[in-house]
Image (spheres, rainbow, N blue to C red):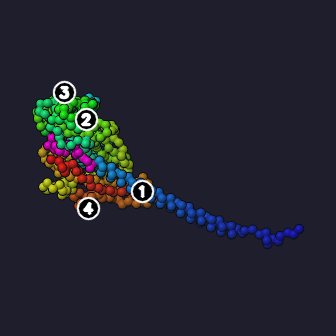
Amino acid sequence: MTRPSPATCRGFSLIELMVTVAIGLVLTLTISMMVARQESVRRGVTSSNDLTSNTAYAAYMLDRQLRSAGAGFSQATAENYGCVLNASLNNGQLLPSTTAFPPPFATVPQTYVLAPLIVYAGLGANGSDVIAMATGNSGLSESGLPVSPKSTAAGQLKLSNTLGIRGGDLVLLAQQGVGCMLQQVSNGFAGGAAQVLTFGGAYAADTINGKSLLGFSNGNAFVSVLGNVTGNLPRFMLFGLDGNGTLRSYDLLKLSSSNAEALVDGVVDMRVLYGVDTVRAGLGQVTAWIAPTTAGYTAAELTAGTAVAQTNLQSVLAVRVGLILRSDLVDKSDVTPATLQMFSDLGAGVTYTYTVPTGTTNQRYRVVEFTVPLRNVRYSR
């Protein structure tokens, strides 16, 4: 047997081992940094995509809701616009509300005044705006149906005919100088040549808030069909932000829910401008954008029920909505400037500057603006 020489049995030296370990550490650190960077990029892209999706959905949802504002009652503006709406639910007064609306709408006036769209400036979280919108959803002609003089009685009234009206329909009974009242057509009613329209159901009541059905008997009263309690629901809604950055809606008639429903997360501000026809030459063109704090266009003035208020309501042909959304992802460095602007293309008079809260400039923000035409107001009389 032969033994290997000592020279052939020699292993790695300490220096060689240290060099090898150092190279391994450098490679491990490099790979870890690449993985961490890739993960950071991936999370940033995902957050940006989520923010884009939320922004698109919020804009789509509000546009879809607001575009039909005024449907069902805009063909009788003298009777309907600026009228205090009286409504009952299960024999209890629903509107004007006897209690404050649920948060974040607790500061909105409990007396609801009928109008296609009203902006309550600054009543939302952090001074954001609240939108009150009303629209019918009936397949019947939007022209008001005249009530036969001295025909109202307990639970009924007379029209020239009741074609197209069916059981469960919600109708608006209005008369200039008298008021507005919501009623429900009795179940099983089938309209036609019969003139007597009977009321019954959860939303039917002979007297609401001191307003009696018999008070609409002296002529010039109109009935407008708004929709049905099943299927094509009318929408009398509030839209606003809560303190947690959630866009919420509230159904004033409680047809779909009695709570404030969450719609979109991550919305930190909402501002609205009126698109107004200041020329009023019958051309139906927006000639100026006006903030809802402008004299003549505040919520209090537009809901005053005066002739000036009705004229101003009819001059609002569109709204421009601005939203600011924020992502949940927190970056290591700042990715958002200290201030953001909305409506900057409309001039200094209506440009709004949003100050990013301290400590959140390392979160991504997104500003979106969109214009919604109020098509039913344009063709009102």
Magenta-colored span:
66-79
Kindly state the secondary structure of the residue where label 3 is placed. Answer: loop
Q: Residue at x 26, y 39 (%)?
A: 227
**Picture quarter containing residue 44?**
bottom left
Indicate which disc, 4 or 3, sits on the residue closer to the N terminus.
Answer: 3
In the drawing, does residue 1 fall left or right of residue 67? Answer: right
Kindly identify the amino acid type of the residue bearing the numbered disc 2: Arg
Indicate which disc, 2 or 1, sits on the residue closer to the N terminus.
Answer: 1
Disc 2 crowd rating (10 Å Cα; few below 14, some 14-19, many 20+) is many
Q: Nearer the viewer, mark 2 or mark 1?
A: 2
Q: On the image, numbered disc 1 is attached to which residue?
A: 49
Disc 1 crowd rating (10 Å Cα; few below 14, some 14-19, many 20+) is few
Indicate which disc, 3 or 2, sits on the residue closer to the N terminus.
Answer: 3
Kindly state the secondary structure of the residue where label 4 is placed. Answer: helix
Q: Nearer the viewer, residue 335 or 240?
A: 240
User: How far is disc 4 from disc 1 in space, using C-alphas?
Assistant: 26 Å
Name the mark on residue 345.
4
Query: What x and y, as percent, mark residue 182?
Result: 22, 35
Furthest toward the right, the residue is 1
Disc 3 crowd rating (10 Å Cα; few below 14, some 14-19, many 20+) is few
Q: Is residue 267 above or below residue 179?
A: below
In the drawing, does residue 26 fall left or right of residue 290? Answer: right
Q: On the image, numbered disc 2 is attached to which residue?
A: 166
Query: What x and y, as percent, mark residue 23?
Result: 62, 67
Of helix, strand and loop, which mostly describes the magenta segment? loop
Q: Nearer the viewer, mark 3 or mark 2?
A: 2
Q: Residue at x 38, y 48 (%)?
A: 265
Q: Nearer the viewer, residue 193 or 323?
A: 193
Disc 4 crowd rating (10 Å Cα; few below 14, some 14-19, many 20+) is few
Q: Is residue 377 above or below residue 216?
A: below
Magenta stretch containing residue 181, yes or no? no
Kindly state the secondary structure of the residue where label 2 is placed. Answer: loop
